[in-house]
Image (cartoon, rainbow, N blue to C red):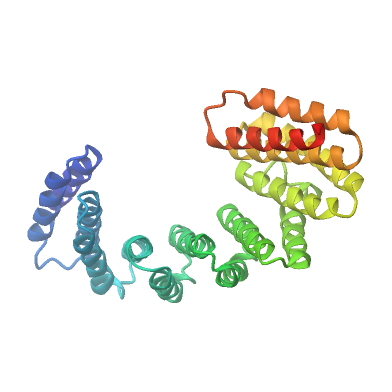
């Protein structure tokens, strides 16, 4: 057994060193060494070797062989009660879902994700629950990318229902992302009242009034700021001053969090909110203040290397030109 584990470690090292052929050969040796062995440790090492081999086949572009190898883990290990094997099966499912999404159809990926939820959705092991949640979240995004907004909303609602009562930080983040993605799909469908309701849920669950700003992970605070921005945009259609108040309050609250954690996600959402704030100033008739606010954003983003800041600078410049006349 120790020899097989040493071979497996060598295979992992070869994969990390971008030596796919060597890694594949070593995983085959692992399985040959373990022929006939049926201990939990041997079953786990066999499954781990196949996952490494499948990953390296993907690197080589051998998609069909990679998928077949992942599926062999699912076929051989699904009934195994050991935590390690349950995790291996979940990881194999996740990879097949990704392959079907990339080389098949969204429906194939969604069907496999539903199988995975049925099999492992109620697993008590958090690492397994996390993999399942990530794949469910991926299906929501793939529906969004395909323009299938109703299905994206349904998938997001199912994910929220599954994790809404969890206090685990990772689960809270999944819920916030699912609500956000569902809200974006609703917005594309023009269902404004539901959009507002969904983003208000994000704010109510995770926003400043819960006292969680200091303890939220940065990405969760970023999602709250995004939700506030979406609510402010809806408010601006009727009350630009009210939208401006919403934006100012959020900026005052979340700039402190930005200074503390230095999160790129939160910084990006706050910058986007500043662009919207300038728009609200213009909508309130405060033209000079709006132009100055746009100028601040444009100057801050000048020559920025990241795509988000460049895009926001362009948005600010377009908005500024509108108000400048």
Residue 323, image quadrant: top right
Q: Residue at x 48, y 64 (%)?
A: 139
Residue 268, above or below 96: above
Percent position of residue 254, x then y: 74, 38
Q: Quadrant of the N terminus?
A: bottom left
Q: How many marks?
A: 0
Residue 141, above or below 298: below
Percent position of residue 237, x then y: 84, 54
Residue 85, image quadrant: bottom left
Residue 37, image quadrant: bottom left
Q: Is residue 322 visible?
A: yes
Q: Residue at x 84, y 50 (%)?
A: 236
Q: Residue at x 52, y 27 (%)?
A: 305
Residue 150, above or below 239: below
Q: Answer with left or right where residue 101 lies relative to residue 289.
A: left
Q: Is residue 167 visible?
A: no
Q: Residue at x 64, y 65 (%)?
A: 164
Give 2 or 90, whichever is nearer the viewer.
Answer: 90
Percent position of residue 301, x then y: 63, 27
Percent position of residue 179, x then y: 65, 61
Give 42 or 90, whichever is nearer the viewer.
Answer: 90
Q: Quadrant of the C terminus?
A: top right
Q: Answer with left or right where residue 246 lies relative to residue 199.
A: right
- Residue furthest to the front in view is 325
Give 263 or 59, whichever is nearer the viewer.
Answer: 59
């Amino acid at each position: 057994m120790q020899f097989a584990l040493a071979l497996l470690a060598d295979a992992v090292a070869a994969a990390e060193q971008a030596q796919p052929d060597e890694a594949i050969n070593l995983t085959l040796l692992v399985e040959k060494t373990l022929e006939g062995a049926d201990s939990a440790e041997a079953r786990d090492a066999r499954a781990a070797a196949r996952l490494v081999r499948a990953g390296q086949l993907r690197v080589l572009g051998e998609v069909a062989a990679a998928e077949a190898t992942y599926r062999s883990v699912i076929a051989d290990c699904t009934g195994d009660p050991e935590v390690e094997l349950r995790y291996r099966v979940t990881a194999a499912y996740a990879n097949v879902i990704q392959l079907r999404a990339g080389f098949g159809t969204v429906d194939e990926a969604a069907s496999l994700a539903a199988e995975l939820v049925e099999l492992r959705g109620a697993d008590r092991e958090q690492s397994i629950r996390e993999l399942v949640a990530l794949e469910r979240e991926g299906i929501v995004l793939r529906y969004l990318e395909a323009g299938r907004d109703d299905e994206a909303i349904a998938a997001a609602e199912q994910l929220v229902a599954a994790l809404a009562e969890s206090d685990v930080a990772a689960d809270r983040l999944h819920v916030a992302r699912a609500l956000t993605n569902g809200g974006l799909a609703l917005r594309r469908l023009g269902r404004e009242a539901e959009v507002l309701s969904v983003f208000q849920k994000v704010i109510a669950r995770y926003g400043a009034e819960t006292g969680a700003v200091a303890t939220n992970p940065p990405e969760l605070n970023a999602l709250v700021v995004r939700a506030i921005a979406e609510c402010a945009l809806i408010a601006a259609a009727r009350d630009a001053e009210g939208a401006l108040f919403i934006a100012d309050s959020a900026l005052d609250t979340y700039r402190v969090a930005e200074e503390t954690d230095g999160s790129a996600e939160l910084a990006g959402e706050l910058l986007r909110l500043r662009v919207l704030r300038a728009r609200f100033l213009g909508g309130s008739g405060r033209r000079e203040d709006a132009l100055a606010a746009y100028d601040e954003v444009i100057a801050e983003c000048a020559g920025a290397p990241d795509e988000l800041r460049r895009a926001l600078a362009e948005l600010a410049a377009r908005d500024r030109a509108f108000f400048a006349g």
